[in-house]
Image (cartoon, rainbow, N blue to C red):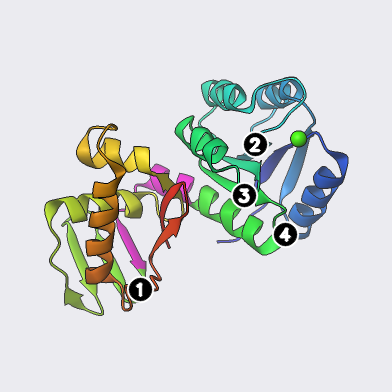
């Protein structure tokens, strides 16, 4: 999918990073709105309808997580967070607060564009209720609850399917351990070790080489992503 002139609201207080974001996004035909503070971000949200918000978590006037909640109250817009390297707990907190994804600073243009495309596509899919996922050898039919690898049916246990279903519904997006425990086990307090066991089993069944997965990717300290 191309950008199709989607409008991105950049919320970032550091001028050099903002300039870099502006240049990168403009080169990919995105339209750009800018804010340097949380107050400016909310102001921009009230006066425009951005298709996506790119949000730096470290702003001078507002707590980034609170700001995610405030933006969410105004519009169901996808939010991609910019965060520092190694700050896994901040990423998890942002995802659990309603952010769609994150990009770690310093970021590469390719990675940034891939994350933005995935977040925009995911929102379109939710609106159009795309009921299947297909990539390489893997096919997931979410209506008939069928999984195929290279044209052959794959038999999954109910839990394995439920995990894959969540990943497929949110394809391209990282899902936190908490999200998966809540949706699959209906209990966030379940030991994440169970999740790791089921992910391992799932990879045995759907990956060509389970030791180096191409579909179900681990985001260390955060969760899993289907690509
Ligand atoms: Ca900052």
Label 1 vs label 3: CA separation?
Answer: 25 Å
| Sequence-wise first label, 4 or 3 | 4
Q: Secondary structure at mark 4?
A: loop
Q: Residues within 10 Å of mark 4 (few under 14, many from 20)?
A: few
Residue at 54% x, 23% y: name it.
69
> Label 4, on which residue?
28
| Sequence-wise first label, 2 or 4 | 4
Q: Is residue 1 magenta?
A: no
Asked whether the viewer can see residue 203, the reply is: yes
> Label 3, on which residue?
103
Label 4 vs label 1: CA separation?
Answer: 35 Å
Q: Looking at the picture, how far across and down is residue 185, in whole percent?
A: 21, 39
The answer to whether 130 appears left or right of 19 in the picture is left
Q: Looking at the picture, how far across and down is residue 132, in whole percent?
A: 30, 59
Magenta residues?
122-134
Tell me if label 2 and label 1 are in contact, CB under 8 Å: no
The answer to whether 27 appears left or right of 114 in the picture is right
Rendered position, 61 above or below 210: above
Residue at 54% x, 40% y: name it.
91
Label 2 vs label 3: CA separation?
Answer: 19 Å
Of circles 2 and 3, the one toward us is: 3
Would you identify the image quadrant in which residue 226 lies? bottom left
The answer to whether 29 appears left or right of 214 in the picture is right
> Label 1, on which residue?
211
> Label 2, on which residue?
50
Front residue of 134/89: it is 89
Residue at 47% x, 48% y: name it.
221
The answer to whether 197 appears left or right of 116 in the picture is left
Q: Residues within 10 Å of mark 1 (few under 14, many from 20)?
A: few
């Amino acid at each position: 999918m191309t950008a199709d002139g989607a409008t991105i609201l950049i919320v970032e207080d550091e001028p050099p990073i903002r300039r870099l974001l502006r240049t990168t996004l403009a080169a990919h035909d995105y339209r750009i709105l800018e804010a340097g503070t949380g107050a400016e971000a909310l102001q921009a949200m009230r006066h425009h309808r951005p298709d996506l918000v790119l949000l730096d978590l470290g702003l001078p006037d507002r707590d980034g997580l609170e700001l995610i909640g405030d933006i969410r109250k105004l519009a169901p817009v996808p939010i991609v967070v910019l965060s520092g390297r190694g700050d896994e707990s901040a990423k998890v907190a942002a995802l659990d607060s309603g952010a769609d994804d994150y990009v770690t600073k310093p970021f590469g243009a390719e990675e940034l564009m891939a994350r933005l495309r995935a977040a925009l596509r995911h929102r379109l899919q939710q609106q159009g209720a795309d009921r299947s996922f297909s990539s390489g050898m893997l096919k997931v039919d979410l209506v008939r609850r069928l999984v195929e690898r290279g044209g052959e049916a794959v038999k999954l246990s109910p839990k394995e399917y439920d995990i894959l279903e969540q990943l497929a519904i949110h394809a391209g997006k990282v899902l936190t351990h908490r999200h998966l425990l809540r949706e699959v086990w209906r209990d966030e307090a379940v030991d994440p070790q169970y999740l790791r066991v089921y992910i391992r089993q799932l990879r045995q069944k759907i990956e060509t080489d389970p030791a180096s997965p191409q579909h179900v990717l681990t985001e260390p300290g955060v969760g899993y992503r289907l690509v």
